[in-house]
Amino acid sequence: MNAPTLLVTGAAGFIGSHTVIELLTAGFQVVGVDNFSNSDAKAVDRIQALKTEVLDLRGVNFKFYKADVRDAKALEEIFKTHVVHGVIHFAGLKAVGESFEHPLAYWENNVGGTMSLLKVMQEQNVKNLVFSSSATVYGIPESLPIKEEASTHAFSPYGQTKLVCEHLLEDFAKANKDWNISLLRYFNPVGAHESGLIGELPNGVPNNLMPYVTQVAAGWRDQLSIFGSDYDTPDGTCIRDFIHVVDLASGHVAAVQAMLSNLETHPLNAPKFSINGLNIFNFGTGYGVSVKELVETFESVTGQKLKHAFVERRQGDVPAVFADARKAKEFLGWEAKKGVDQMCSDAWKWQLNLKQTEVKA
Ligand code: NAD
Ligand code: UDP
């Protein structure tokens, strides 16, 4: 009996690479696709090394193709070469600030890429899809913690593309009742694999907090700017629901296990959870941590003093965001387990493994 095969788009990226490892560990075969627009071939080498040399996962395969998800012909070839049971679609552009400068690129890549993939999946009769959405679709939350039924509103072109893809997939699911589609709204993924062999390496100056923190600690950047200290929060800095990327990755395994629960070739004989049709899940921890708390935790866990300054608020930042994470626990049997200490120590371990030459201007 062969284990099911999952196609992972954006497999060389931050969340994709960690999810590939968790899928392989769970017994899935994985086919990865990436165009390296925000990653490079070294990420694929690192995944292969972690898989084979460290984790000794020899019974499962990770096959990788450099391809763009908007290239329908390339996708078709991949689907014809492998019997694909489901797709996890990470590929996309994700920088909020950049999306204001290049809205067309964001719409074309994120919406165009999803449409292209969906069409090929339909042609090839592959009916299980996990889509990477984001907590950004909640805009300024009306209440906390944020439930999946909360109203949605996008502030940036990036957020718009995520919301439009969600609407597209909702329409598609209504017309195709035999499909299983999971929309996963991630909160703030941080950290790295505990081996320190894979992690987050954004191109150029990081936009996100954790990679900026680790790069300051490593001496790659002068100091951290903490955006805003006058928010209406206990310590004046923003509050976020930081989630360890390995927890997030294992959540994807739980989602595909539940979606593929009726497959005869499932690696688990009797998956406990089963979902059908279109489902939306928050992927967060359920608790908020302030930016200041995260910085202090990083300092105490790693012993690194972090040069930082409190500066003006960053445009568009929402004061406090954290998930109601109970639905994923109830329907997928998954919840995040790792704490902020581990998020910081694993991110630092990864940073220490990187060489200065890895930074792209
Ligand atoms: P990432 O940039 O590290 O990974 C995305 C990968 O997709 C990159 O390797 C990139 O080269 C690839 N890619 C982009 N466009 C492509 C295309 N057209 N064809 C093929 N490959 C393409 O980002 P990530 O943090 O791993 O995010 C993965 C997904 O999760 C994205 O869709 C992102 O919007 C979403 N998300 C991320 C966060 C976050 O904070 N990291 C939060 C919420 C949602
Ligand atoms: N942040 C910061 N300095 C940085 C990057 C981020 O103070 O260099 C803050 C940002 O204002 C927000 C929080 O850290 O309050 C998380 O930001 P990030 O960009 O990581 O994720 P977001 O929540 O915006 O998706």
Image: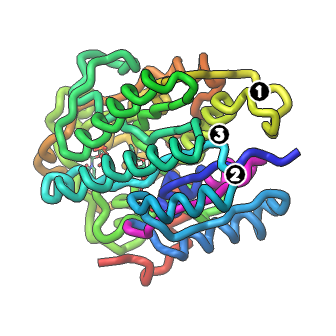
Q: Secondary structure at mark 2?
A: loop
Q: Is residue 35 shown in magenta?
A: yes
Q: Which residue is located at x 28 percent, y 28 percent?
A: 138
Q: Are marks 2 and 3 in contact (CB under 8 Å)?
A: no
Q: Is residue 295 above or below residue 195?
A: above
Which numbered circle lies on residue 271?
A: 1
Q: Could you tell whether 245 is left or right of 318 in the image?
A: right
Q: Work out whether residue 304 can be spotted.
A: no
Instruction: Locate the N terminus by quadrant.
Output: top right
Of tags 2 and 3, the one toward the viewer is 2
- Tag 3: residue type? Val
Q: Is residue 30 above or below residue 313?
A: below
The residue beneath circle 2 is: 83
Q: Position of residue 253 (x, y in %)?
A: 65, 39
Q: Work out whether residue 160 can be spotted.
A: yes
Q: Is residue 206 shown in magenta?
A: no
- Tag 2: residue type? Val
Q: Position of residue 54 (x, y in %)?
A: 76, 65
The residue beneath circle 3 is: 253
What is the tally of numbered marks visible in this picture? 3
Q: Nearer the viewer, residue 294 or 271?
A: 271
Q: Which residue is located at x 12 percent, y 45 percent?
A: 315
Label located before the other in sequence (3 or 1): 3
Tell me the CA gap for discs 1 and 2. 21 Å
- Tag 1: residue type? Pro
Tell me the CA gap for discs 2 and 3. 19 Å
Q: Based on the displayed image, in which of its 4 quarters is residue 211 positioned?
A: bottom left
Q: Position of residue 151 (x, y in %)?
A: 27, 19
